[in-house]
Image (cartoon, rainbow, N blue to C red):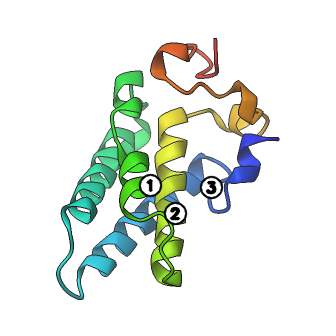
């Protein structure tokens, strides 16, 4: 299966930036009504870091791409939420985090198969960002 088929909101780099901005806004909106936990604060901080690391065409380093732990936090804290608003937020956050971690060029992102994706940074080819 193609990697891109797992993404609803991101189909290219331009979509990533739109979805990242949307994820930040949604996170801020969900935090407004009342008390929130440290997970939401951490996710928002990490989204801002991703935004900074990718601003103005900057290419994030491999170490930066693998550093955020948003995927772990979302799985631990929010997986299986039943509220449709929070469920949609979780899906967008996961797409942003996974896309950032891989950071494929559009031509690769749109054609790579899921079995070519590395699970750990040490398994990633530094040029293609695919499994060695």
Q: Is residue 90 above or below residue 51?
A: below
Mark 2: few/some/many CA within 10 Å (<14, 14-19, 20+): many
Residue nearest the viewer, comparing 7 with 38: 38
> In the rendered structure, which disc, 3 or 2, sits on the residue that comes first in sequence?
3
- In this view, the residue farthest toward the right is 1
Residue 109 % position (x, y): 69, 37
Quadrant, the N terminus: top right
**Which residue lies under the disc numbered 1?**
75
The Cα atoms of the two marked residues, 3 and 2, are separated by: 9 Å
* Numbered disc 2: secondary structure: helix
Nearer the N terminus, badge 3 or badge 1?
Answer: 3
Whether residues under marks 3 and 1 lie with C-beta atoms below 8 angstroms apart, the answer is no
Q: Earlier in the sequence, mark 1 or mark 2?
A: 1
38 sits to left or right of 49: left
- Residue 48 percent across, percent down from the top left: 28, 53
Tag 1, which secondary structure?
Answer: helix
The residue labelled by disc 3 is 10
Residue at left offset 21%, top offset 74%: 36
Number of residues whose C-alpha sits closer than 10 Å to that of mark 3, classed few (under 14), some (14–19) or many (20 or more): many
Residue at position x 65%, y 28% in the image: 117
Circle on res. 17: none
Residue located beneath label 2 in the image = 92
Q: Few, some or many C-alpha atoms within 10 Å of disc 1 (few <14, some 14-19, many ≥20)?
A: few
What is the spatial separation of the Cα atoms under label 1 and label 2, in whole angstroms? 13 Å
Contact (CB < 8 A) between labels 3 and 2? no
Report the Cα–Cα distance between label 3 and label 1: 20 Å
Q: Of discs 1 and 2, which sits in the foreground? A: 1
């Amino acid at each position: 299966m193609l990697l891109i088929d797992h993404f609803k909101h991101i189909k290219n780099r331009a979509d990533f930036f739109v979805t990242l901005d949307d994820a930040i806004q949604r996170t801020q909106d969900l935090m407004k009504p009342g008390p929130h936990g440290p997970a939401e604060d951490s996710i928002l901080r990490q989204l801002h870091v991703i935004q900074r690391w990718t601003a103005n065409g900057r290419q994030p380093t491999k170490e930066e791409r693998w550093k955020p732990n948003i995927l772990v936090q979302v799985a631990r804290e929010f997986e299986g939420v039943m509220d449709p608003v929070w469920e949609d937020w979780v899906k967008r956050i996961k797409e942003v985090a996974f896309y950032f971690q891989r950071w494929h060029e559009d031509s690769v992102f749109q054609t790579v198969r899921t079995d070519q994706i590395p699970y750990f940074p040490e398994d990633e080819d530094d040029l293609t960002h695919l499994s060695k």
